[in-house]
Amino acid sequence: MLGKILRKLDRMVTHIEEWTLFIIVIAALISLFANVVLRYGFNYTLAWSEELVRIVIIYSTFIGASVAVKQRSMIRIDAVVQIFPRLKPGLTFYSNILMLVFAGMMVFYGYKMAHLQLMTQQKTIIMQIPLVIIYTIMPVMGVMVFIRTVQVMIQDFRNR
């Protein structure tokens, strides 16, 4: 029962990650390509293109953190594990607990920052996108990293 729920949740989160990354990166590539053609072909620049790319970099970084947790490719120092291989399960568990704490902090503080942007109604300079839309990625990423970390912990527990 739990395995079925986890597989469905994994498929849903993977679907969200893949399609979000695909759509935003394609949008950034198209806008950058159009900007380069217009700049060098017609001596005209799209100011919003660079702002869009900046937003895409922010989103892809935060969503990429969730993908990295799923693929177990987060940056870590494993010198102690190489010297003392018996410590690997304990250190991996400790690392996962720290990742859960980090995810919780991203949800909490990301929500506070997004709420602040909602209250002040700030917008980006060129495209006039409400900053709450940009800051909302922080708590969303926190939830996704939390889900992915729990999935990794369950996989580790089952493999032992």
Image: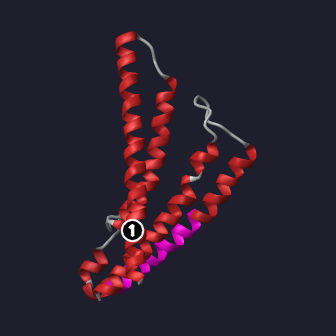
What residue do we see at 37% from left, 75% from top?
152
What residue do we see at 42% from left, 83% from top?
2
Q: Quick one: 88 or 142, which is closer to the camera? A: 142
What residue do we see at 39% from left, 10% from top?
42
Q: Quick one: 4 or 97, which is closer to the camera? A: 4
Picture quarter with the C terminus: bottom left
Whether residue 95 appears in magenta in the rendering, the answer is yes
Q: What is the secondary structure assignment of the residue under circle 1?
A: helix
Looking at the image, the residue that sits furthest to the top is 42
What residue do we see at 67% from left, 58% from top?
112
User: How is colour applied across the structure in the image?
Assistant: secondary structure
- For disc 1, the marked residue is 10
Three-letter amino acid code at the position of disc 1: Asp
Would you place residue 17 above or below residue 33 in this image?
below
Q: How many numbered marks have been drawn onto this rendered protein structure?
A: 1
Magenta stretch: dominant SS?
A: helix
Would you place residue 37 above or below residue 89 in this image?
above
Residue 36, position as x, y percentages in the image: 36, 22
Residue 62, position as x, y percentages in the image: 46, 54
- Residue 38, by quadrant, is top left
Whether residue 109 appears in magenta in the rendering, the answer is no
Q: Which residues are magenta?
A: 89-106
Q: Quick one: 77 or 130, which is closer to the camera? A: 130
Residue 39, position as x, y percentages in the image: 39, 16
Q: Quick one: 84 or 139, which is closer to the camera? A: 139
Residue 105, position as x, y percentages in the image: 58, 67
Q: Is residue 38 left or right of residue 138?
A: left
Would you place residue 81 above or below residue 56 in this image?
below
Picture quarter with the N terminus: bottom left
